[in-house]
Amino acid sequence: MTVTNRKLIGALMLDEACYKDHGIFIFDLDGTIADSRHRHHFLQDVVDGVNVPKKKKDWVSFFAAQEQDVPHEAVRLLLKALWQCGEIIIILTARPEDQRKVSEIWLNKYGVEYDALLMRPVGCREDDNTLKVRQLKKYFTEEQRARIKTIFEDRRRIVTSLRAEGYHVCHVDEGDF
Ligand SMILES: [Mg+2]
């Protein structure tokens, strides 16, 4: 069944009349929906065939190159199937808010439909794993969090933090940077 007239109220106050029978699925963006491997060199070096985090990560260049991403097709198709079943699709990314427009354009370009795109507040320097745990508590009620079926995420430390909070997490890639 496809839910029509999808809408969100406030920051992410779900319209319960519309959504109460549906599960919530959370997708990370970089490295999960989007194949960001071509820009990982801004964050890590390869030493003797092993990825080593850069001492000074160039996040500005990393985000600036996002327009050249293509989707991870399996994740895109899975998201689409869940959307068409009427499930609630939330994209939760540590990208800063000033990347919203380019992110929305990219998602639209590849036909990714979703209910909300949650991003890092501008100026927030919080670690992404801490940020994502906090964002989920900020935007969802306890009852809604209980309806989060799965979180799709590539970054290992975020996976670890989310699992520690009791979420079911599908680790889609190494994301070890
Ligand atoms: Mg990621």
Image (cartoon, rainbow, N blue to C red):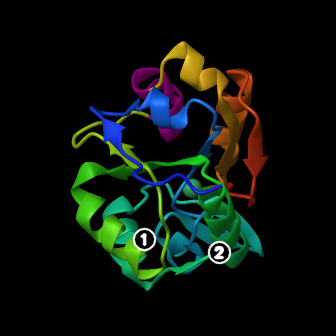
Which tag, 1 or 2, sits closer to the chain's start?
A: 2
Quadrant containing the C terminus in the rendered view: bottom right
Label 2 residue SS: loop
For residue 134: magenta? yes
**Are there few (<14), some (14-19), or many (20+) residues within 10 Å of tag 1?**
some
Task: Tell me where residue 97 appears, x and y as whole percent.
Answer: 26, 50
Give amino acid for label 1: Leu
The residue that mark 2 highlights is: 72
Report the residue at 76% width, 51% height from top.
171
Residue drawn at (22%, 56%) of the image: 98
| Stretch in magenta | 127-139
Magenta segment includes 72: no
On screen, residue 41 versus residue 6, left or right, reads: right
| Image spot of residue 25 (x, y percent) | 62, 44
Q: Residue at x 44, y 50 (%)?
A: 115
Q: Disc number at residue 117?
A: none
Q: Residues within 10 Å of mark 2 (few under 14, many from 20)?
A: some
Question: Residue reaching furthest top?
Answer: 142
- Cα distance in 3D space between marks 1 and 2: 12 Å
Q: Secondary structure at mark 1?
A: helix
